[in-house]
């Protein structure tokens, strides 16, 4: 019969200051970090998918192409997507006699989100599915909402800054064309006046020419 190992328990206790304890602690931290990153990635994918579905629902089935101005108009609507929710929160908090502010945390998150998105839209650009490119638009229309297919959706940043510059450039061009047209019209009027004056002078000269004497 084998001798039993005296003093050795089935689950050996690890000394808290041993190398094995340090290794186990590091391993636990690594696993927690890995799980956190996995959760954050899933949340990002879910948020991105929800955002893309919103834009997909805004597409006009009869429209085959979109301009940059069209994209900016859709983004502007997206930035106002929380308006009804904010309005409801304000109505509830506006009830007379109510103490404390309801849904304050939610309201703060919404306002911070919209402010950040607005800053991107008016700055470096707000990222949306590329609906300006016809090929990418077709792919986006065919997307079924599967998060695994998100890499197939092409994104692009759109800013209203360049749109404003383009608008100013167009207004400047229109003003120059208008000014040129006015100058041309003025030249034509001056030319007509000069032609009329020449005709008057010729008419006077004809009257001053003496008639030939009869013999």
Image (cartoon, rainbow, N blue to C red):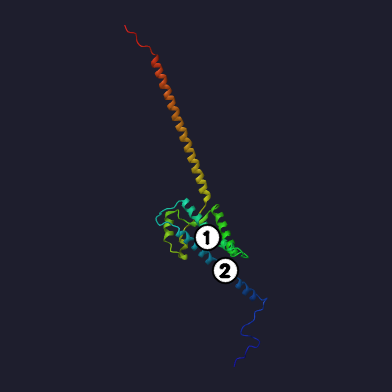
Residue at horizontal 52%, vertical 47%?
A: 164
| Quarter of the image where one finds residue 107 | bottom right
Could you tell me which quadrant the C terminus lies in? top left
* Residues under numbered marks 1 and 2 in contact, where contact means CB atoms less than 8 Å apart: no
User: Relative to the observer, which residue lies in front, 15 or 203?
Assistant: 203
Q: Secondary structure at mark 2?
A: helix
Q: Secondary structure at mark 1?
A: helix
Dot 1: within a 10 Å radius of its alpha carbon, few (fewer than 14), some, or many (20 or more) residues? Answer: few
| Residue 110 position in % (x across, y down) | 56, 61
Asked if residue 209 is positioned above or below residue 74 in the image, the reply reads above
Asked if residue 53 is positioned above or below residue 182 in the image, the reply reads below
Could you tell me which quadrant the N terminus lies in? bottom right
| Quarter of the image where one finds residue 108 | bottom right
Answer with left or right where residue 20 lies relative to residue 202.
right
Answer with left or right where residue 45 lies relative to residue 206.
right
| Residue 183 position in % (x across, y down) | 47, 33
Residue at horizontal 45%, vertical 28%?
A: 190
- Discs 1/2, front: 1
* Residue ranking furthest to the bottom: 1
Mark 1 and mark 2 lie on one chain; the one further toward the N terminus is 2
Name the residue carrying label 2: 36
């Amino acid at each position: 019969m084998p001798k039993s190992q005296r003093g050795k328990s089935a689950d050996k206790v690890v000394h808290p200051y041993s190398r094995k304890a340090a290794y186990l602690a590091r391993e636990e931290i690594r696993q927690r970090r890995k799980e956190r990153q996995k959760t954050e990635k899933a949340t990002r994918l879910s948020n991105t998918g929800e955002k893309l579905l919103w834009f997909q629902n805004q597409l006009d089935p009869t429209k085959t192409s979109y301009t940059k101005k069209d994209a900016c108009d859709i983004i502007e609507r997206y930035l106002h997507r929380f308006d009804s929710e904010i309005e409801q929160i304000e109505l509830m908090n506006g009830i007379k006699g109510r103490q404390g502010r309801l849904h304050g945390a939610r309201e703060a998150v919404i306002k911070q989100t919209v402010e950040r998105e607005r800053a991107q839209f008016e700055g470096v650009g707000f990222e949306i599915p590329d609906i300006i490119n016809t090929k990418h638009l077709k792919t986006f229309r065919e997307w079924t909402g599967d998060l695994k297919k998100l890499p197939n959706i092409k994104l692009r940043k759109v800013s209203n800054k360049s749109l404003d510059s383009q608008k100013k450039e167009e207004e400047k061009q229109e003003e120059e064309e208008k000014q040129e047209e006015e100058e041309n019209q003025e030249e034509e009027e001056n030319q007509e006046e000069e032609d009329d004056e020449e005709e008057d002078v010729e008419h006077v000269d004809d009257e001053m020419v003496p008639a030939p004497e009869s013999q």
